[in-house]
């Protein structure tokens, strides 16, 4: 665990320092987010935050090679992590081009598919998945198609939620930490080595997000841009793929020491955890597609009706809207982890209290405390 903390801190520090360099580079390259009607920031903000986070991820990966315990991990662990990072670099490069010359949606989609195909060609893909009592094995074609759909869907879900200062970075950072905890415990309960790819990637990803947030939280001094949102989405999806490839079965002893069988719901949660972690951005993505299709528009045409825009409309300030979205993301991610590992009345009571508190913050706080005037910000 201590070595994973080192990876987290190295990724955070490097990402934080590189944000300064990336910001200056974006200004010189004129990669700047101009103010548009659908945006909530009031002044132009430089892009290239994704390059800083990619540097943080790479630093965490390289440091892991030299740590006493993680360096003993098998070749597969570092091979798969390296494949995911290269795939992340591919979509990050596509995002940089978009930040510079504004690529059309189909070109960006093509870049995402190429990155997902790179993962598949290097054996980072869905092989099988398990639900209570049944294990489903996928043939190569099914595994390839589902992998591409998972990667592209996650990439675009993160991209869609990137609309306020610190929102996407915080949601993904929370998801990465929760998925790290799940991966670590899954390896422990199954008697596997704790040096696993998913935990390594999530530790570095969480650190990269934490290092980026001081520069991006309202009022932002730098945006991650598509280079950052697509990078985060791919690495998070890639970490889930490596986990499914490592464990042929899922065994979480939620009632350790009690001698009882896990309840059916707790058995389902581990399988649904990757979806739960990104349920907030996935919900936003689905609602946007339905909304735009019903209006006779293409699904990728932007608008100003995302979940974070709704929070602003009911009276939240930008910072409060972001914090509330973080609360929902944390409730879903950590709630799923807690239920899957410790399905006890106290845990359910804690999650219920968390849910009620989040509902209160979402719908009642604006009536009790009007927001301040909006400040410059918003990741567009």
Image (cartoon, rainbow, N blue to C red):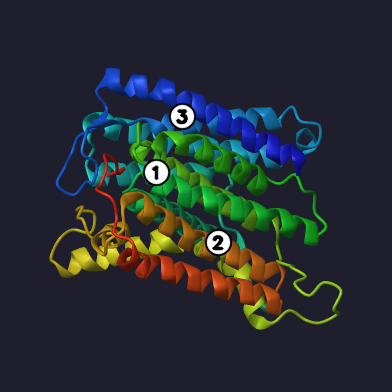
- Label 2 residue SS: helix
Mark closer to the chain start, 1 or 3: 3
Along the line of sight, the residue nearer the viewer: 232 or 244:
232
Between disc 1 and disc 2, the foreground one is 2
**Outermost residue, top side:** 28
Q: Out of 57 and 234, give the one closest to the viewer.
A: 57
Q: CA distance from mark 1 to mark 2?
A: 19 Å
Q: Are marks 1 and 3 in contact (CB under 8 Å)?
A: no
Residue 379's quadrant in the figure?
Answer: top left
Return the x and y of residue 225 as percentages of the image width and height. 34, 38
Query: Which x, y percent locates residue 365?
Result: 37, 65
* The quadrant where residue 101 appears: top left
Does residue 138 show up? no
Task: Give the class, few, some or many, for how many residues have Cα within 10 Å of label 3's Cα (few <14, many ≥20).
Answer: many
Q: Which sits earlier in the primary sequence, circle 2 or circle 3?
A: 3
Q: Which residue sits at x=17%, y=70%?
A: 294
Q: For mark 1, what is the residue?
A: 229
Q: Secondary structure at mark 3?
A: helix
Q: Residue at x 60, y 39 (%)?
A: 204
Q: Which residue is mark 3?
A: 52
* Place of residue 219 in the rendered image (x, y in percent of width and height, measured from the top left): 34, 38
Q: Alpha-carbon distance for marks 1 and 3?
A: 12 Å
The residue where tag 2 is placed is 333
Mark 1 neighbour class, 10 Å CA radius: few under 14, some 14 to 19, many 20 or more:
many
Instruction: Look at the image and tell me whether residue 147 can be seen.
Output: yes
Name the spot of residue 297 as percent of width and height, x first: 15, 61
Q: Is residue 9 above or below residue 192?
A: above
Q: Earlier in the sequence, mark 1 or mark 2?
A: 1
Question: Disc 2 versus disc 3: distance between alpha carbons?
Answer: 25 Å
The answer to the question of whether label 2 and label 3 lie on touching residues, with beta carbons closer than 8 A, is no
Quadrant of the image for the N terminus? Answer: top right
């Amino acid at each position: 665990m201590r070595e994973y903390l080192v990876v987290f801190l190295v990724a955070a520090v490097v990402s934080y320092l590189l944000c300064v360099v990336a910001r200056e580079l974006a200004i010189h390259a004129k990669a700047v987010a101009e103010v548009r009607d659908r945006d909530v920031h009031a002044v132009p903000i430089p892009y290239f935050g994704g390059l800083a986070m990619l540097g943080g991820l790479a630093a965490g990966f390289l440091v892991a090679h030299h740590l006493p315990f993680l360096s003993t991990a098998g070749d597969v662990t570092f091979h798969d992590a390296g494949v995911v990072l290269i795939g992340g670099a591919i979509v990050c490069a596509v995002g940089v081009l978009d930040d510079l010359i504004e690529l059309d949606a189909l070109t960006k989609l093509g870049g995402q598919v190429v990155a997902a195909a790179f993962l598949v060609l290097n054996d980072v893909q869905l092989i099988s998945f398990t639900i209570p009592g049944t294990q489903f094995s996928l043939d190569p074609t099914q595994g390839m198609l589902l992998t591409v759909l998972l990667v592209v869907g996650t990439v675009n879900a993160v991209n869609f939620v990137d609309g306020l200062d610190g929102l996407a970075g915080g949601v993904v950072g929370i998801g990465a930490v929760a998925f790290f905890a799940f991966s670590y415990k899954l390896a422990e309960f199954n008697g596997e080595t704790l040096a696993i790819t998913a935990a390594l990637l999530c530790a570095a990803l969480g650190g990269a997000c934490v290092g980026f947030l001081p520069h991006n939280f309202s009022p932002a001094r730098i945006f991650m841009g598509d280079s950052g949102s697509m990078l985060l989405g791919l690495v998070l999806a890639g970490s889930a793929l490596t986990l499914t490839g490592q464990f042929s079965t899922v065994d979480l002893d939620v009632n350790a020491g009690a001698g009882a069988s896990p309840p059916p719901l707790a058995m389902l949660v581990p399988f649904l955890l990757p979806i739960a972690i990104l349920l907030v951005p996935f919900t936003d993505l689905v609602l946007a597609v339905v909304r735009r299709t019903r209006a006779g528009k293409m699904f990728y045409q932007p608008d100003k009706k995302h979940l974070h825009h709704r929070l602003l409309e009911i009276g939240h300030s930008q910072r409060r809207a972001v914090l509330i979205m973080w609360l929902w993301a944390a409730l879903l991610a950590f709630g799923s982890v807690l239920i899957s590992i410790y399905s006890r009345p106290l845990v359910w009571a804690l999650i219920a209290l968390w849910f009620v508190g989040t509902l209160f913050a979402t719908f009642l706080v604006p009536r009790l405390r009007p927001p301040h005037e909006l400040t410059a910000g918003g990741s567009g």
